Structures are given as C-alpha cells and as structure tokens.
Amino acid sequence: MTDPIQSLRDAIIADPENAPFTAVGWRPVFAASPESRILLVGQAPGRRAQESGIPWNDASGDALVRWLGVDRETFHDPVAFAIVPMDFYFPGKSGSGDFPPRRVFAAAWHPPLLEQLTELRLTLLIGAHAQRAYLPDRRRTLTETVRYWRDYGPAVFPLVHPSPRNTAWQQRNPWFEAETVPDLRMAVAAALAD
C-alpha cells in the first residue's frame, strides 16, 4: 500500500523548483500523519532544523514546546502534531534574520498534504506568513491577531513566532505569557486528549 504522505515528500523532492535544495542534499522538513491531531503552520525551517531534518530543532522550538505545554517526544510525534511550514526548506539568511518562505510553495504543496490529515482538531498559525495564508480576515497587525485569537477559535490559534528575536515583543506584550499561553496549553491538551 502506498503511503500518500511519503509520495508527496517524493514529489516535493523531485520538483524542479526544489532542485537547488536537493542538489546540496537537503530534504523537505515537515512531519505529518493521517492521524495528526494538531496542525502547526510556521514559516520555514531554520538552518539547524534543515541540517538535522528535525522541525523546530533550535531555541525557537524550545520556546514553542514550553508554550504548548508538551515535551519534545510529544511535539515530534506526527500523530500529535503535523508540522507543516509555509516552505519546507531553509530559505537562507538575510540581513535581519532568515529570508521569508517562497510565496508559491505553500500554495502548491499544502492542499494535497492537508487532504491527508483527516483527524485535525486544532490549527496553530505561527507568525505573519502563516496567518496571512490561513486567516484572510485577520486583524490589521500580528499583535492584534494574536491578542484576539478567540475571534478565530476555537479550532484556530494564531501565535507570534517564538524566536529569541521576539523577546522584546514579549516584554512589550506581557498579556501573551499571562493570558494566551495558558489558553493555548488548554487547547493543545484538549486536542490531544482521547
């Protein structure tokens, strides 16, 4: 029996648009199972994640796991979390961080992948790129979208990116840790409960 997610992975690798990544030995970084309960849509893998092949394998991932209230084993269990960034390849470094994900990647590859994820209970949209793609009616700013997450819930939860570069944002917005993170943990626990 053919594994449709592996077939999609093979098609992504074979896509000429991804040839430069394949040529240097990079594989698409995502994780999913037909039984995934939570869809986590982020930006794109960082360099460490790309080189290890493990999504969120960096300080941002450590912060995200803490926000979610799970351990790394649960986070990397594809039955628990489908980790589907807007681009499955590290986009390279820019002057102020990483380049954004390629605009056409998610439009081409998310729909056939998401068709396979029939058990989803919760979607986490991390950062502006994911929110622009999946929340056409989002608020004017990322901060407002994250603060008023209930406008999109209960099955969708927009979040700020957990990058250490966003420490200043978190300091300016203490409501996030005080109010949003506890609600996020409850939503995650509910989605993972049998």
Image (cartoon, helix red, strand yellow):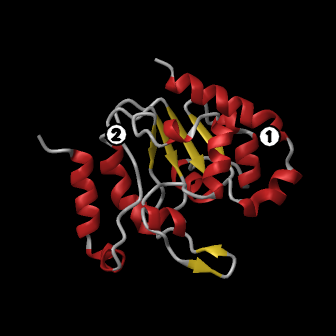
As drawn, the residue found furthest toward the left would be: 1
The residue at 60%/52% (across/down) is 61
Mark drawn on residue 33:
2
Q: What secondary structure is found at the residue carrying circle 2?
A: loop
Numbered-mark total:
2
Relative horizontal placement of residue 56, taking residue 141 as reference (left or right): left
Residue 129 vs 121, above or below: the answer is below
Where on the picture, by quarter, is residue 53? bottom left
Q: x, y percentage for residue 15?
A: 26, 70
The residue at 88%/53% (across/down) is 172
Q: What secondary structure is found at the residue carrying circle 1?
A: helix
Given the image, on which type of amino acid does mark 2 rest? Ser
The residue at 55%/42% (across/down) is 72
Q: Is residue 158 or residue 66 the one in the foreground? A: 66
Q: Is residue 9 or residue 137 the one in the foreground? A: 9
Residue 45 seen anywhere in this rendered image of the structure: no
The residue at 54%/60% (across/down) is 43
Q: Earlier in the sequence, mark 2 or mark 1?
A: 2
Label 2 crowding class (10 Å Cα cut-off): few <14, some 14-19, many 20+? many
Given the image, on which type of amino acid does mark 1 rest? Glu
Distance of label 2 from label 1 (alpha carbons): 30 Å
Q: x, y percentage for residue 169?
A: 81, 56
Label 1 crowding class (10 Å Cα cut-off): few <14, some 14-19, many 20+? some
Mark drawn on residue 91:
none
Relative horizontal placement of residue 154, taking residue 34 as reference (left or right): right
Q: x, y percentage for residue 50?
A: 46, 66
Q: Which residue is mark 1?
A: 177
